[in-house]
Amino acid sequence: MPETASPARELAVQVATAGLDKKALGVEILDVRGRVDYADFLVLMTGRSDRHVGSIAQGIEEELGKKKIAPISVEGMSAATWVLLDYGDVVVHVFQEDARQLYDIEGLWMDASRVAVPEGEAGARPATQVNRAQADAGEGFGDDEPSADDDEDRSEEE
């Protein structure tokens, strides 16, 4: 389908941006208009842990709440392995890496077109590519010594 502006598409981009603001990885927007009747766009992203997944989902809810947009339903927040936020025409999936690989929504919808995610963020790449790039750069999640980047991240959050 052509890249046309629609309220649902704009909402999907807002969701992606809110996820990136919370350091979500592997952010993708799938255009499923005309393929399913329950949504026009699926927004997928990954968190590093249950706390990170919960933080991403809450951040999305808070950001959209500022615009008086509330989800119809939220599922999975207590375990935070896979949180689903249903905004009607936009359904958001926030996964831990293992759950994202297991359910492989990208694989199920491989023929769906992708919507551009706001550029300039590592989160715009698929999560597995982000993890490989970080590992190649020596930025593993289990590093014992904090890096200069960790200090910058802490100061941004405070």
Image (cartoon, rainbow, N blue to C red):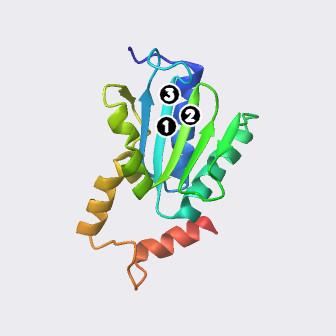
Callout 1: helix, strand or loop?
Answer: strand
Q: Which mark is residue 41?
A: 3
Q: Determine the residue positioned at 32% across, 61% down.
A: 131
- Residue placed farthest to the front in the image? 102
Quadrant containing the N terminus is top left
Most extreme residue toward the right, as rendered?
Answer: 68
Cα separation between marks 3 and 2: 6 Å
Tag 3–tag 1 contact (CB < 8 Å) = yes
Q: For mark 2, what is the residue?
A: 91
Q: Secondary structure at mark 3?
A: strand
Percent position (x, y) of residue 138? 28, 73
* Viewer-proximal residue among 75 and 16: 75
Residue type at the position of mark 1 = Val
In percent of width and height, residue 90 lies at: 57, 30
Q: Quadrant of the C terminus?
A: bottom right
Query: Label 2 sits on what residue type?
Result: Val
Residue 14 appears in which quarter of the rendering?
Answer: top right
The image quarter containing residue 91 is top right
Q: In the picture shown, does residue 41 fall above or below 33? A: below
Instruction: Report how far apart the C-alphas of labels 2 and 1 lie in the structure.
Output: 6 Å
- Of the residues under marks 2 and 1, which one precedes in the sequence? 1
Q: Which type of secondary structure does the marked residue at label 2 adopt?
A: strand
Residue beneath disc 1: 43
Whole-percent x, y for residue 32 in the image: 44, 23
Q: Which of these two is toward me, 43 or 4?
A: 43
